[in-house]
Structure formats: C-alpha cells, structure tokens
C-alpha cells in the first residue's frame, strides 16, 4: 500500500484499512485540533521523531485495554489501599505532558513529544478533548499519563513515573473510573510488556476500527474529570 500525502486544506484521512504494512498511513498535514480529532475518530494517531516529517499511524494489530480487564496485582492492591500516592485528574495537564516529554526512555533513545506536539495537545486539553491523570507524593508530581476522550473511547498517549509504581497507580484509577462510566475501550496504540502485564492485548485493526466506528461521533465535553471521577475504589468502606 502507498503512504498517502495529506493535503494542507483537507483534514480528512484515507481509510485506515489502507495503511502500509509498516503501520504508517500518511505523511504531512499539521497538528491542528481539528485534524488530530479527525485522526483519532479515524483510528489514526500522530507519531514521529523531531527530525522526521509528520507521520500518521494505524498499526495492525492494535494494542488496546478493555477497562474491566485491568490487572491489579496483590502488591498493587496493598499500595492502593494504603493510599501510597494521591491521584487527581485534569489538575496539571501541562506538568504531565512536560514530564512525559523530558523523562528518559532507554528503549526510544529520546522523546517523540516535540514542542509543537506538546502545544497542540495542550490546546486539545483546553477545549476538553485531552485529559490528564496526576499522581502526587506529598505535593510532588511523581507520575501520570494523558490521552484523548471521545464518546466511550479513551486514546492513551503517554505516561511517566518518577517513583516506583506511580504511573501504574494512576492508570489503575483511570481504568476503574472509565469502567464505571461505561467506556468501551482504551487505545494503547503499540504493544509493550508493561501494558500487557496490566491487561492490555492486541486485536486486529479491523476489530479496533469497529469500536472506533461506534465512537466516532466526535462527542466530547469540557469537563473537570477531578469532579467527575473518584479515587476511593480500594479504600471505600462497604
């Protein structure tokens, strides 16, 4: 399959089913809010290194996690019950994406979150599409993650940990809330052993696109998830 060249004045994407074997569907375009939202609604996401052109991906298979399938180990349950960390939502999006950009990732050799992408995602947060999870230890931001939300699908983008299990702590709280809010699927994009250990699995792109087709009405509201979500799943008295 060819890799498509996107037009500057057209935000629509070719069908994800036409993606090249490498997982790259298209090149070019921009990081406008409208185009990025259209990408997620089409089963596509941007991913490129600073020295690369703007690349748009739709890999096959696709790594996903169904919120109800989140795996919580016995040791993690103990940490959650002890409230080792404090979790908030949408309280420091800029801090989370900044940490995700700066943290060293030995398997990647550097960051793929360019300053342009960071600015684009902060804009998406400001209009209510992107959300963040913050994990705190005595007032210090020690972990977190961010991603987009559309209808009943969450599109995970990146996470970080400065302390042991901090990102796991936040991710589990996110999954429990998404399950409670009847979210169908979390897009994890690419497989990692870490995600698999938490319940993520690979499904055919065609199956993933069926979920996205059901959630592509592009509905999202500007909400403070900190008021909507809770963090007492493992500490609430029955």
Image: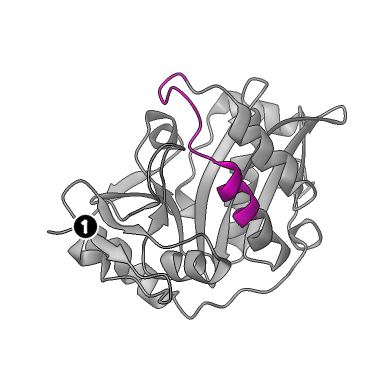
Query: Front-most of 58 and 237?
Result: 58
Query: Front-most of 23 and 206?
Result: 23
- Please state if 28 lies on the left or on the right of 36 as rendered: left
- Which residue, given by chain and number where applicable, does mark 1 sit on? 3
At 68% across and 54% down in the image, what residue appears? Answer: 122
- Please state if 224 lies on the left or on the right of 117 as rendered: right
At 59% across and 23% down in the image, what residue appears? Answer: 75
Residue 83 x %, y %: 77, 32
Residue 206 x %, y %: 23, 64
Total marks in image: 1
Magenta stretch bounds: 106-121
Q: Is residue 171 magenta?
A: no
Q: Residue furthest bottom?
A: 217
Residue 96 x %, y %: 69, 40
Q: Is residue 84 visible?
A: yes
The part of the image, by quadrant, that contains residue 124 is bottom right
Looking at the rendered structure, the secondary structure element under dot 1 is: loop
Q: Is residue 108 magenta?
A: yes
């Amino acid at each position: 399959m060819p890799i498509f060249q996107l037009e500057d004045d057209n935000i629509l994407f070719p069908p994800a089913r036409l993606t090249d074997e490498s997982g790259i569907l298209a090149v070019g375009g921009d990081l406008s809010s409208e185009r990025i939202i259209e990408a997620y609604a089409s089963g596509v996401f941007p991913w490129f290194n600073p020295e690369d052109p703007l690349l748009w991906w739709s890999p096959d298979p696709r790594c996903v996690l169904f919120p109800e399938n989140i795996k919580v180990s016995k040791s993690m349950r103990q940490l959650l019950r002890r409230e080792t960390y404090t979790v908030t939502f949408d309280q420091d999006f800029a801090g989370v994406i900044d940490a995700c950009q700066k943290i060293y990732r030995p398997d990647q050799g550097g960051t793929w979150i360019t300053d342009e992408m960071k600015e684009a995602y902060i804009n998406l947060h400001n209009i209510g599409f992107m959300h963040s999870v913050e994990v705190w230890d005595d007032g210090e931001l020690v972990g977190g993650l961010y991603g987009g939300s559309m209808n009943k699908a969450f599109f995970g983008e990146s996470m970080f940990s400065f302390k042991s299990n901090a990102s796991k702590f936040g991710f589990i709280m996110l999954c429990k809330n998404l399950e409670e809010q009847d979210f169908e699927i979390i897009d994890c994009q690419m497989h990692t052993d870490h995600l698999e250990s938490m319940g993520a699995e690979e499904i055919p792109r065609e199956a993933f696109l069926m979920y996205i087709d059901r959630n592509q009405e592009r509905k999202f509201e500007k909400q403070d998830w900190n008021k909507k979500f809770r963090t007492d799943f493992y500490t609430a008295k029955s």
